């Protein structure tokens, strides 16, 4: 049985990463002409998958799901304060779905080559997270989430040029963020691999 105090470092790290990402996703990355395809949140959010996968490796999927659910609840509350209710709802929905999917895929692949489980689970989870978050947070069809809280429409539906095509800004931002998530997800294999010997599986936790 996993002791609750053993999970606190993972839980705290998850809350910090998700809350920071929810705040930073509101700000375009205004360097190198990438302001219309990238936000600062893309650089921090992939760390959530690393935390989830390390928890899963150490304590098993049940503990990983506990981290996801508790981290989700706390992060949503903090995000309402730091960002907006719509972003908190979008983030909470995307986070919960993507991280639980990551947990399930990682657990299925955990006995294969060391890098396969974290890489595949992170990539698939990132796809789901990006689609859910950017559509709920910024698409015009979900503008009622703003009006429900008496806030101005937060939609980013106006067109921008992407590879010669006109697409809504939120689609452009989503594609840019996903591209960075893929790159950082690959980079996260380095700390994951480095921590393998320190975070050996606790079989009793499964």
Image: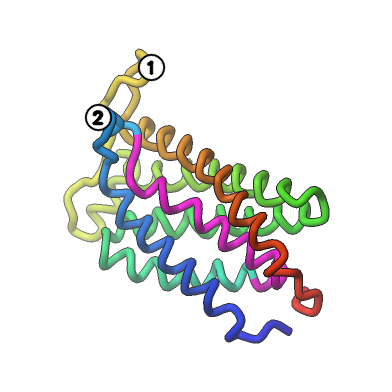
Q: Which mark is residue 116?
A: none
Residue 148 lies within the magenta run: no
Give the x, y percent position of residue 80: 30, 65
Give the x, y percent position of residue 48: 51, 58
Nearer to us in this view, 73 or 3: 3
Q: Residues within 10 Å of mark 1 (few under 14, many from 20)?
A: few
Q: Residue at x 26, y 67 (%)?
A: 81
Q: Could you say whether the residue bearing mark 2 is in a helix, strand or loop?
A: loop
Nearer to us in this view, 47 or 123: 47
Nearer to us in this view, 117 or 134: 117
Q: Could you say whether the residue bearing mark 1 is in a helix, strand or loop?
A: loop
Main SS, magenta residues: helix
Give the x, y percent position of residue 7: 59, 78
Residue 62 lies within the magenta run: yes
Residue annotated with mark 1: 163
* Render colour scheme: rainbow
Q: Residues within 10 Å of mark 2 (few under 14, many from 20)?
A: few
Q: Nearer the viewer, mark 1 or mark 2?
A: 1
Q: Where, by quadrant of the figure, is residue 187 drawn? A: top right
Residue annotated with mark 2: 158
User: Left or right: where does residue 190 sit relative to residue 60?
Assistant: left
Q: Residue at x 77, y 56 (%)?
A: 110
User: Left or right: where does residue 147 sit relative to residue 201?
Assistant: left
Q: CA distance from mark 1 to mark 2?
A: 16 Å
User: Left or right: where does residue 97 sit relative to residue 161?
Assistant: right
Q: Residue at x 33, y 42 (%)?
A: 39
Q: Where, by quadrant of the figure, is residue 57 drawn? A: bottom right
Task: Report the span colored magenta.
Answer: 38-63
């Amino acid at each position: 049985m996993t002791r609750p105090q053993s999970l606190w470092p993972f839980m705290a790290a998850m809350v910090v990463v998700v809350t920071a990402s929810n705040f930073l996703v509101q700000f375009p990355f205004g360097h190198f002409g990438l302001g219309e395809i990238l936000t600062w949140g893309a650089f921090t959010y992939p760390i959530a998958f690393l935390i989830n996968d390390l928890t899963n490796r150490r304590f098993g999927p049940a503990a990983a799901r506990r981290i996801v659910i508790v981290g989700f609840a706390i992060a949503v509350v903090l995000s309402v304060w730091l960002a907006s209710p719509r972003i908190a709802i979008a983030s909470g929905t995307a986070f919960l779905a993507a991280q639980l999917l990551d947990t399930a895929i990682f657990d299925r692949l955990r006995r294969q080559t060391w890098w396969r489980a974290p890489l595949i689970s992170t990539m698939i989870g990132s796809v789901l997270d990006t689609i859910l978050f950017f559509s709920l947070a910024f698409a015009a069809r979900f503008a009622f989430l703003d009006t429900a809280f008496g806030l101005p429409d937060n939609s980013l539906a106006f067109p921008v040029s992407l590879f010669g095509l006109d697409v809504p800004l939120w689609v452009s931002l989503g594609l840019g963020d996903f591209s960075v998530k893929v790159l950082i997800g690959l980079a996260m294999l380095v700390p994951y691999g480095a921590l393998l010997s320190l975070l050996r599986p606790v079989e009793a936790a499964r």
